[in-house]
Image (cartoon, rainbow, N blue to C red):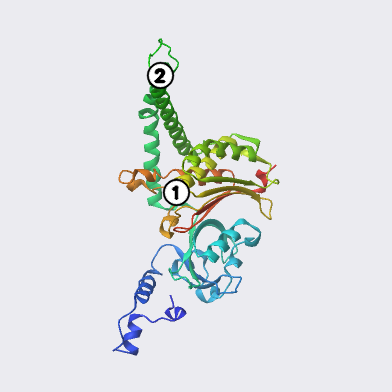
Amino acid sequence: MNASMFNKQTTAQRKISDPGILPMTPQEKEFGLFDSVFHEVSNAIAIISREPGSHSPIIVDINHHFELVTEYQLDEIAGQNLYDFIPSIRSGSNYHVIEEALESRQAAVLFCSWVHKNGKIIDMDMTIRPFSSEGDDSRFICILRENDSENNSRDKAAKEIKRNLLAAMHHNFKTPLNGILGYSEVIMSEMLGPIGQESYKDCAQDIHGAGRDLLHLIDNLLDLKELETAEFSLREEKFPLTEMIAECIGKLSLDAEKASIDLFCKVDPNCKNIFGDKSRLQQTIHSLLTNALKFTPHGGEIIISARRDNNGACLISCTDNGVGMGSQQLAKIFCHDTHLSNIYSTPTVGIGFGLTYVKQLIERHDGSVSIISAKGKGTTVTLYLPPSRLC
């Protein structure tokens, strides 16, 4: 990176120009560390800037891997509008995600298309985050990763571990669980005669409820395993979007009430019917709401909304005002090995299947997922379904 772009000098420059100069400030040290690894990392990175009053994020600098992926050189792309390289940006949902991230100085992850120098369109996963924590800094880091996780050996290894784990669950968890459910049903129905104490029936209901929830979780995890196979197929049908969302809210309304969290629903009348796998799409909405409830404090609010964009696509968003995520968390939110290392040390974080499941399932519906979040500012997850899914 060109240090002069940031009006700062490297250590070497400082020593040459003034041997008696004071030591570097923490901000200068932070910049120097970033500068030293900028060209060495294996992700395509661009530094973008949007000055106050400007409507366009401008590309200021790029690293070596960016040149390899896009074949643009710095002198060809510096000073260009970022949006010029993202097809149909202003008519799609990505424009609003990027704009909100720039305006609020939050981090965001999204799927986008990028125009290669040769004119070819490359599918990319993009992460945008502020260059520094300084509130008046107009610069942002834009990281592009080719949307082909099979090229990532670490990701492939994590997926293989997960596949083996899910396969083991089928017998080791599901078989004895069916027995638990069966015995609790015998007790609840008093099939063998009166049980005498009403409290026994309450206990049986708790056993059955917990077993049912666990079975539902295992079925979802097995569904995730199936998602990664060629044999996976959608059970598609036409269904009303409003009713599906209302059912999801109904299932979680009691939990929200206990936590003093308000649930709101805003559905555009133009988003009437969806053509897709109803039960699985319903599970994605349920997963988003469950995550939002988990990380929203008492007295907070969650809004689930649906609208059509300028191209006629359907955008389903889940927004909360909870704890939010930092840039590092957001950057690896869709990684297959997320949370696997700390399941046992921090059980409440879950095992990392939720958003991975959501992303893969929406992609099976020819859509994409974007997330915008920041620590203490809540999270918005948006599901994009193409116009062909609305009917």
Please name whichever residue, 34 or 256, is drawn nearer the observer in this view of the structure.
Answer: 256
Name the foreground residue: 187 vs 98: 187
Which residue lies most toward the top here?
A: 193
Above or below: residue 364 compared with residue 76 = above
Please provide percent x and percent y for residue 283: 53, 38
User: Label 2, on which residue?
Assistant: 198
Residue 253 position, x and y percent, is 53, 38
Gap in angstroms between the C-alphas marked 2 and 1: 36 Å
Which class describes the residues within 10 Å of circle 1: few (<14), some (14-19), or many (20+)? some
Location of the N terminus by quadrant is bottom left
Is residue 96 left or right of 66 when viewed as pictured?
right
Residue 115 in view (yes/no): no
Quarter of image, res 162? top left
Amino acid at pointer 2: Glu
Residue 51's disc number: none
Q: Position of residue 226 (x, y in %)?
A: 48, 36
User: Mark 1 falls on what kind of element?
Assistant: loop
Of all residues shown, which one is farthest toward the left? 20
Q: Residue at x 59, y 40 (%)?
A: 245
Q: Nearer the viewer, mark 2 or mark 1?
A: 2
Residue on which the image places disc 1: 295
Q: Position of residue 86 (x, y in %)?
A: 59, 62
Kindly identify the residue that appears in the image at 50 percent across and 45 percent down.
261
User: Are circles 2 and 1 on residues that touch, CB within 8 Å?
Assistant: no
Q: Earlier in the sequence, mark 2 or mark 1?
A: 2
Q: Amino acid at mark 1?
A: Phe
Indicate the quadrant containing the C terminus: top left, top right, bottom left or bottom right. Answer: top right
Give the structural element (helix, strand or loop) at label 2. helix
